[in-house]
Image (cartoon, rainbow, N blue to C red):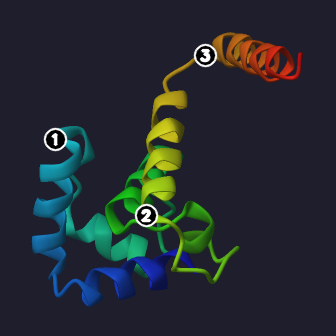
Amino acid sequence: MYGKRIRTLREKLGLSQTQFIEAFVSKFGEDYRMAQTALSKYEQEQREPKFEMLIAFANFFEVTTDFLLGVSTDTETDKKDTSLINEVSMILCNFTEEELLDIKKYSNFLRWSRGH
């Protein structure tokens, strides 16, 4: 499902694969550069994107990862919320499991403290 949706969204923007890659790298940096063959394999679902790349695709197209994965058919999500969610997801990818547990504990503390 993700491949068809990536291709459809890219084509809706009127971008060739090469143009998309350049725009993608321009937005996210050289760490997100991919060969045209890699993008083609993503679109044909012959290659699965890593989690960080999937989030970047969603952020680029201003959709949710759920939409790209076929979990949701809603393309009319709030762009501001989607962008923020995707940005936070990209940030969280860089933490260790132990750090993520600390973040979860702090988040629970914040929710608890708001209730008092």
Task: Say which amino acid is labelled 1.
Answer: Glu
Q: Which residue is mark 3?
A: 96
Quick one: label 3, few (<14), some, or many (20+) residues within 10 Å? few
Q: CA distance from mark 3 to mark 2?
A: 28 Å
Instruction: Point out residue 39 in the picture as x, y percentages from the top left corner.
Output: 30, 69
Q: Nearer the viewer, residue 11 or 31?
A: 11
- Quadrant where the C terminus sits is top right
Q: Residue at x 10, y 61 (%)?
A: 22
Q: Which residue is mark 1?
A: 30
Marks 2 and 1 in Cβ contact (< 8 Å): no
Task: Say which amino acid is labelled 2.
Answer: Lys
Q: Residue at x 80, y 13 (%)?
A: 109
Q: Within the image, what quadrant is residue 79 found in?
A: bottom left
Instruction: Point out residue 111 in the picture as x, y percentages from the top left corner.
Output: 80, 24
Where disc 2 sits, the SS reads: helix
Task: Judge from the rendering whether residue 23 lies leftward or rightward of residue 67; answer left or right.
Answer: left
Q: Residue at x 86, y 18 (%)?
A: 112
Mark carried by residue 52: none
Quick one: label 2, few (<14), some, or many (20+) residues within 10 Å? some
Where disc 1 sits, the SS reads: helix
Quick one: label 1, few (<14), some, or many (20+) residues within 10 Å? few
In terms of sequence position, does the residue under pointer 3 or pointer 1 come before the other?
A: 1
Task: Say which amino acid is labelled 3.
Answer: Thr
Instruction: Point out residue 105 in the picture as x, y percentages from the top left corner.
Output: 79, 14
Residue 68, placed above or below residue 101: below
Q: Which residue is mark 2?
A: 79
Residue 14, placed above or below residue 63: below
Instruction: Point out residue 71 in the picture as x, y percentages from the top left corner.
Output: 70, 73
Marks 3 and 1 in Cβ contact (< 8 Å): no
Marks 3 and 2 in Cβ contact (< 8 Å): no
